[in-house]
């Protein structure tokens, strides 16, 4: 598989960004190649050809991407090789990424915070530390609850919510003005 200049630029950038997201450059590039090829599944040899990397690097990268649930194995009739693709829907990819990051990063942090908050503070410094941890725990729990609600939204609703952007803030400001007016509060009073 030969990459066009535009595709190659995307793949290279995705590799660079992957290293910033906590995956190595090669894994990011493998994902980018599979993403661009979707819905057509690719085998490891096609990825080796596209990226000019070793077969073992491709195999390890594919295993890592499977661990993240970001690639889908596909079987091609009359071909014994494994083929892989990505979900076609970018929203599905985003949902998988968010869920995997939550499982790997947020959930363990909440567990540690819960354990530390259940311990008896032996000194004022520990009480202070636990008070700060309780604030962090409450915020992360609130974000997790919000995430659980948002992830159940249909894609059309989620898209509409994102399009609203700052409009939500304006709507909340208007609501506050109405509530304050109803309570008899005026601006500046």
Image: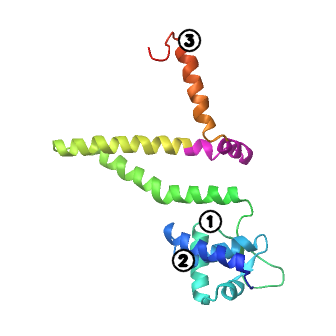
Tag 1, which secondary structure? Answer: loop
Q: CA distance from mark 2 to mark 1?
A: 18 Å
Q: Residue at coordinates 56% horizontally, 74% vertically from top-left?
A: 64
The image quarter containing residue 55 is bottom right
Q: Position of residue 86 (x, y in %)?
A: 70, 68
Tell me the SS state at disc 3.
helix
Q: Quadrant of residue 15?
A: bottom right
- Of pointers 2 and 1, the one earlier in the residue sequence: 2
Point out the tag, 1 or 3, that comes first from the N-terminus: 1
Question: Rounded to the nearest whole Å, what is the CA distance between mark 3 and mark 2?
Answer: 57 Å
At 69% from the left and 85% from the top, the residue drawn is 50
The spot of residue 147 in percent (x, y) is: 56, 45
User: Which label lies toward us, 3 or 2?
Assistant: 3
- Few, some or many C-alpha atoms within 10 Å of disc 1 (few <14, some 14-19, many ≥20)? some
Specify the principal SS of the magenta part: helix
Can you identify the residue that label 3 sits on? Answer: 182
Q: Position of residue 85 (x, y in %)?
A: 72, 72
Compared to residue 74, the image places residue 171 above or below, namely: above
For this rendering, which residue is in front, 181 or 120?
181
The residue stretch that appears in magenta:
147-163
According to the image, label 1 marks what residue?
A: 69
Camera-side residue of 128 and 171: 171
The 10 Å Cα crowd at callout 2, few under 14, some 14 to 19, many 20 or more, is many
Relative vertical location of residue 79 with respect to residue 174 in this rendering, above or below: below
> What residue is shown with label 2?
25
Between 80 and 8, the one nearer to me in the picture: 8
Residue 158 belongs to the span the image colors magenta? yes
* Residue 25 image point, x, y percent: 54, 77
Residue 84, above or below 177: below
Q: Earlier in the sequence, mark 3 or mark 2?
A: 2
Q: Secondary structure at mark 2?
A: helix
> Residue visible at 74% across and 81% down?
4
């Amino acid at each position: 598989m030969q990459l066009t200049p535009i595709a190659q630029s995307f793949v290279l950038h995705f590799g660079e960004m992957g290293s910033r997201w906590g995956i190595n450059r090669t894994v990011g590039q493998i994902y980018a190649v599979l993403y661009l090829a979707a819905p057509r599944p690719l085998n490891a040899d096609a990825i080796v050809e596209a990226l000019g990397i070793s077969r073992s690097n491709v195999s390890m990268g594919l295993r890592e991407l499977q661990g993240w649930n970001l690639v889908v194995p596909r079987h091609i009739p009359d071909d014994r090789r494994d083929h892989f693709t990505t979900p076609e829907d970018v929203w599905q990819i985003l949902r998988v990424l968010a869920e995997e990051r939550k499982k790997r990063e947020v959930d363990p942090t909440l567990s540690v915070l819960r354990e530390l908050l259940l311990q008896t503070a032996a000194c004022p410094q520990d009480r202070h530390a636990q008070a700060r941890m309780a604030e962090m725990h409450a915020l992360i729990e609130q974000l997790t609850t919000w995430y659980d609600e948002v992830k159940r939204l249909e894609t059309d609703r989620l898209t509409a919510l994102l399009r609203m952007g700052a409009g939500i803030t304006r709507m909340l400001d208007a609501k506050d003005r109405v509530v304050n007016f109803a309570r008899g509060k005026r601006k500046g009073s």
